């Protein structure tokens, strides 16, 4: 929603939901309190390309409390929560996002975000950074640095750094332990199942659930699908990950074999054409297809469109494709991130840690960005540790400390006894 469109009723619903999410974001709340006192981002211009959700709103308010001037656009055309956009707009944030925007609008909004001449970019999938590099390279001179939220974005940015074309430093927030071990695993696991169930209302118990890709997202998804009573099959290209899946007790097989037996398929690989014509050709009548990877390229939708003789929407977010032999395949959420398109994305309790990393990394970039190379950097270990410590404290959980003897033992190399 471009911020000139005001809708008080929508904004008021968004405000309540943002406050609901905030209850589960104690770490971000603590950071916001400190930012309010210290104003470490005073006058800093930020362009953020993120899923416009209640959790993101809490991040935006935190950055604004630190003194930043923020422009926000969506990192996916189908993930924007319009009530959240309306609430942010009412609070004076420049928001350029509306749910269901087409490709042209999506990129126009990215450009509008860049019109603010950012000093910091915050990205989820690297569309913002790649637009700067392809179409607005002159903006890069003023950019101190950027953050990247997701695996797919980090892969794209590392490839830019490798080719020597990256014009400013990036911090790979995704790679922080307190991000990917929780957000990618428990967040994707739960929210993907949530999206599938909201879209279909099917019973998972007893279904054959195929997870394509066993990275940290696939791992979480497989775990939760098994917890709901599904029989889980994993497909992989990495022998190591495949072996891990086997030892976790999942059935592992090539995707063409899984295609014949699966009731439900979810792609979480970060790669394209994971499910394609040869798979659609052998799937069972009624098979359901969904994607939880960042881009809508994992299921070859053009091939499905070409094979189908008819197509209709049978429920919100459920498209039925009728094949010439009478089989019907069901595609969820147009093959876009099912957890954000058909549900509300990851729960606030995990986004708390992801976005605490984001806020602290922005603060770090404001302080240190000018001294960094044009490379992709890990999140500083102190930030990762601090987020873990604060999260535990917010849960009232304390842990042990090493005794001086234990510390000495770990530091010495002379004798094991
Ligand atoms: N990515 C996944 N879930 C999300 C959420 N709830 N908010 C923002 N980005 C997300």
Image (cartoon, rainbow, N blue to C red):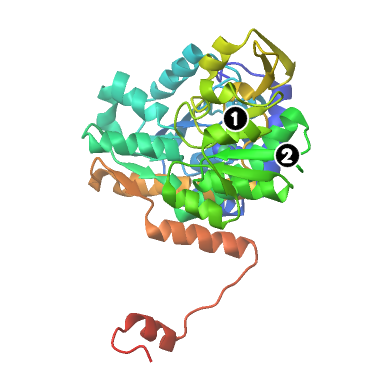
Q: Position of residue 121 (x, y in %)?
A: 39, 34
Instruction: Identify residue for label 1.
Output: 88
| Left or right of 270, for residue 263 | right
Q: Going by the picture, which residue comes out furthest to the top?
A: 309
- Residue at screen point 49% across, 30% down: 274
Does the beta carbon at disc 2 come under 8 Å from ligand 1?
Answer: no
Instruction: Identify residue for label 2.
Output: 207
Q: Position of residue 318 (x, y in %)?
A: 70, 21
Quarter of the image containing the C terminus? bottom left
How crowded is the residue under tag 1: few (<14 C-alpha within 10 Å), some, or many (20+)? many
Q: Position of residue 209 (x, y in %)?
A: 66, 39
Using the rendered view, name the quadrant where residue 373 is placed.
Answer: top left
Q: Secondary structure at mark 1?
A: helix
Relative vertical location of residue 115 with respect to residue 67 in this rendering, above or below: above
Which label is found at residue 31? none
How crowded is the residue under tag 2: few (<14 C-alpha within 10 Å), some, or many (20+)? some
Q: Nearer the viewer, residue 50 or 288?
A: 288
Using the rendered view, name the quadrant where residue 366 is placed.
Answer: top left
- Residue at screen point 78% across, 37% down: 203
Q: Nearer the viewer, residue 342 or 1?
A: 342
Quarter of the image containing the N terminus? top right
Q: Nearer the viewer, residue 232 or 397?
A: 232
| Left or right of 92, for residue 366 | left
Locate ligand 1 by image quadrant. top right
- The answer to whether any part of residue 37 appears in the image is no
Q: Going by the picture, which residue comes out furthest to the left?
A: 164
Relative vertical location of residue 251 with respect to residue 337 in this rendering, above or below: below
Q: Nearer the viewer, residue 109 or 413?
A: 413
């Amino acid at each position: 929603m471009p911020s000139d469109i005001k809708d008080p009723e929508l904004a008021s619903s968004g405000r309540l939901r943002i406050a609901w999410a905030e209850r589960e974001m104690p770490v971000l709340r603590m950071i916001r309190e400190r930012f309010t006192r210290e104003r470490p981002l005073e006058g800093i211009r930020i362009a953020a390309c993120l899923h416009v959700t209640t959790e993101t709103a809490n991040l935006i308010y935190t950055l604004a409390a630190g003194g930043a001037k923020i422009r926000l656009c969506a990192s996916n055309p189908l993930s924007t929560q319009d009530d959240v956009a309306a609430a942010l707009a009412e609070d004076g944030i420049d928001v350029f996002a509306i749910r269901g925007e087409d490709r042209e609008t999506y990129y126009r909004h990215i450009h509008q975000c860049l019109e603010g001449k950012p000093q910091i970019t915050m990205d989820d999938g690297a569309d913002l950074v790649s637009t700067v590099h392809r179409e607005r390279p002159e903006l890069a001179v003023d950019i101190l640095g950027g953050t990247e939220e997701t695996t797919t974005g980090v892969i794209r940015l590392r490839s830019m750094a490798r080719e020597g074309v990256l014009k400013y430093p990036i911090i790979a927030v995704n790679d922080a332990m307190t991000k990917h071990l929780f957000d990618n695993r428990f967040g994707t696991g739960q929210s993907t199942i949530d999206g599938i169930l909201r879209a279909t209302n099917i019973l998972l118990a007893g279904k054959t659930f195929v997870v394509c890709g066993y990275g940290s997202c696939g791992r979480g998804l497989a775990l939760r699908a098994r917890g709901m009573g599904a029989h889980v099959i994993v497909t992989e290209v990495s022998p190591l990950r495949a072996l891990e899946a086997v030892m976790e007790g999942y059935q592992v097989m090539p995707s063409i074999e899984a295609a014949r037996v699966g009731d439900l398929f979810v792609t979480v690989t970060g790669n394209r054409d994971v499910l394609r014509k040869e798979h659609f050709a052998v799937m069972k009548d009624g098979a359901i297809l969904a994607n939880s990877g960042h881009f809508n390229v994992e299921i070859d939708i053009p091939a499905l469109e070409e094979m189908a003789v008819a197509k209709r929407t049978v429920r919100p977010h459920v498209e039925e494709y009728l094949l010439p032999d009478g089989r019907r395949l069901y595609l969820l959420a147009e093959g876009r991130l099912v957890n954000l398109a058909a549900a509300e994305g990851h729960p606030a309790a995990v986004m708390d840690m992801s976005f605490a990393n984001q806020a602290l990394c922005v603060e770090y970039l404001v302080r240190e960005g000018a001294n960094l190379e044009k490379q992709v950097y890990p999140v500083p270990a102190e930030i990762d540790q601090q987020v873990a410590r604060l999260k535990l404290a917010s849960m009232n959980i304390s842990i042990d400390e090493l005794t001086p003897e234990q510390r000495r033992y770990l530091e010495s190399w002379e004798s094991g006894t």
